[in-house]
Amino acid sequence: MRAKVQQKLLTLPVSFFDNNKSGTLVSRVMIDVEGVRNLVGTGLVQLIGGSISALISLFILIKINAQMTLFVLLPVAIFALIALKAFGYIRPIFRVRGKINAEVTGRLTETLNGIRVIKGFNAESQELKVFKKGVDELFQNVKKSLTATAFITSSSTFLLGLASAGIMGMGGYFIMNGSMTYGEFVSFTLFLGFMIAPIVQMSNIGSQLTEAFAGLDRTQELMGLT
């Protein structure tokens, strides 16, 4: 993929390179394409494996007790909606981060390459001011994404914890009525953990995949230039 992006850059007109810093282009070739690793690597494998484990556990939970399973699915559905909204909010942030990171990296590269000219004109303070501004923009962007990711994680902990607490109460009620045995309750609790664990794991993987798609969006934008 990096070779294809480099090949595309070499075919672009000289005017394109006049309007873009060389350091920025280096960042887009080397960093934006890095998202492919998360898509075809461990992130995608964990997502598929977790989904299969959650579905198998769901079928077993329905077989053990459909009412308790329906109660669990309600907070899980709420969490899924929250996660979809949050990831939709995070993806543009990651795209902007790639742009800011490329600009800061490009400016730093050109500053170090032209250090003799900068010192000759006593422009060190100006370059430092510009670099600090870029780093601050990058910090604010990272803070937004971390806040959204923390919200997703805390929501999953709260909703799934609420479901687990409710299951304890419902399980005790069914056992007292004789409609559920202790063994069935233990089995239900065990498979509930098998279903919930991948969901929590997917919330963490989702942010990595969202960042990967954002980087690939920028790569696709570059590949579409003529």
Image (tube, grey):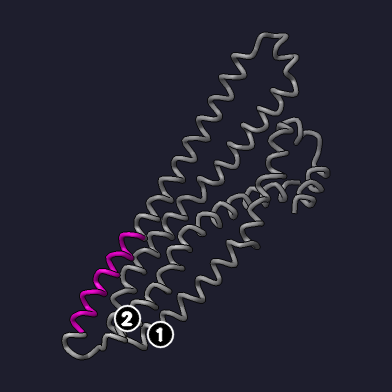
Q: Tell me which residue sits at (75%, 14%) in the image.
A: 116
Q: Describe residue 226's horizontal placement relative to residue 137 as left or right.
A: right
Q: Horizontal and vertical percent for residue 144? A: 44, 42
**Residue in the foreground of this view, choosing between 193 and 46:** 193
Residue occupied by mark 2: 186
Where is residue 140 drawn, in percent x and y?
46, 35
Depth check: give the residue in front, 193 or 74. Answer: 193
Quadrant showing the N terminus:
bottom right
Q: Which residue is mark 1?
A: 60
The mark nearer the N terminus, 1 or 2, is 1
Q: Which residue is at a point 55% across and 42% down the rendered structure image? A: 96
Asked if residue 206 is among those painted magenta in the image, a careful observer would answer no
Q: Quadrant of residue 20?
A: top right
Residue pictured at 43% horizontal, 51% vertical: 149
Q: Percent x, y for residue 175?
A: 21, 85
Of badges 1 and 2, the one in the foreground is 2
Q: Nearer the viewer, residue 93 or 201?
A: 201
Left or right for 68, reference 115: left
State which quadrant residue 19 falls in. Answer: top right
Magenta span covers which residues?
A: 157-174
